[in-house]
Structure formats: structure tokens, C-alpha cells
Image: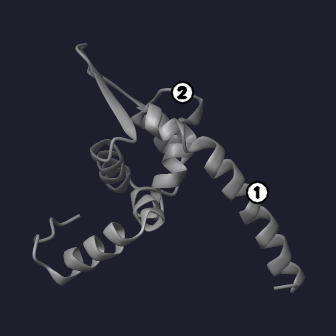
Amino acid sequence: MAIRKENSTNMQNEKCITEGCDLTYAVCKIGGRWKLLILCKLEDGKLRFGEIKKLIPGVTERMLTLQLRELEKDGLVKRTVYAEVPPRVDYELTDVAKELIPIWLQLSIWGKNHKILMKQGVI
């Protein structure tokens, strides 16, 4: 992903949205196609890059790398590099990310129910 200029319209809009609403801020941190899925896969403990990639077969290596970097930068994922040959890197949820687990479980239940209602034509 390209680095955005601090004074770009896109950056100004993002600041306006995220500074004005805490919920929007939170959704921006975990939003996107892959972030929440990555976080959910790390729910049960540490995983290596290749393990995450196998659990999410649709994501490219480049996109997985970018998303993990963003999650690490935002303090949601901890990256541990071991001084071994070949190098080993583990990813795990930070304590602040673990606070999200009950929230995404509840959101998952809502999503399942909403999907059913949509298929039934109730909505």
C-alpha cells in the first residue's frame, strides 16, 4: 500500500471520521477485508506466517504481510522474531486485541442471523 500524504483529502477525511466517533475509530482499526479474519485466526494462540496463510487461503502473501504490519502498528498483533536459523516469526494477539474476542463473537452471531433473514427475504 502506498503511503498517503498527511495533507491529502483522503487523510483529512479519515481524521475527521475517526476523531469524531469512537466506534468509527474502532471499525477503522479492525475493518477491511482481511484484518478481522486474521485476528480471529490468532484467537487460539500464536501462529507463524505460513500457518496464517494456510488458514486464510484467499489472501495473497503481500496482502497478508501488509495487514499484519498494520495490525502490529495499531497494537493489535505482537510480532516476535526468534534469533534462529532459519529465522522464526510468531504472531499473536495483544492484550488489547483479546478484549475484542467477545465483541467479534457477538458480531458473528448477528451476521449469521442477518444472513438467514436475508436469504428468507424477511429483510
Number of the label disc, if any, that sits on residue 109: 1
Q: Decide: marks 1, 2 in contact (CB < 8 A)?
A: no
At label 2, the amino acid type is Gly
- Neighbour tally class for label 2: few under 14, some 14-19, many 20 plus, Cα within 10 Å: few
Percent of width and height locating residue 34: 47, 57
Q: State the colouring used for the structure image.
A: one colour
Q: Nearer the viewer, residue 84 or 104?
A: 104
Could one spot residue 57 in this view of the protein? Answer: no
Q: Quadrant of residue 83?
A: top left
Residue named by callout 2: 45
| Along the line of sight, the residue nearer the viewer: 27 or 46 | 27
Element class at badge 1: helix
Residue 34 seen: yes
Dot 1 surroundings within 10 Å: few (below 14), some, or many (20 or more)? few
Quadrant including the N terminus? bottom left
For the point 52% across and 42% down, which residue is it? 54
> Which of the marked residues, 1 or 2, is nearer the chain's N terminus?
2
| Residue visible at 62% across and 51% down in the picture | 104
Q: Position of residue 103 (x, y in %)?
A: 62, 50
Q: Is residue 88 above or below residue 113?
A: above
- Depicted 50 relative to depicted 90: above or below: below
- Disc 1 marks a residue whose amino acid type is Ile
Whether residue 15 sits left or right of residue 52 in the image: it is: left
Left or right: 9 in relation to 7: right
Q: Disc 1 versus disc 2: distance between alpha carbons?
A: 22 Å
| Left or right position of 5 against 90 | left
78 up-or-down from 54: above or below: above
Q: Nearer the viewer, mark 1 or mark 2?
A: 1
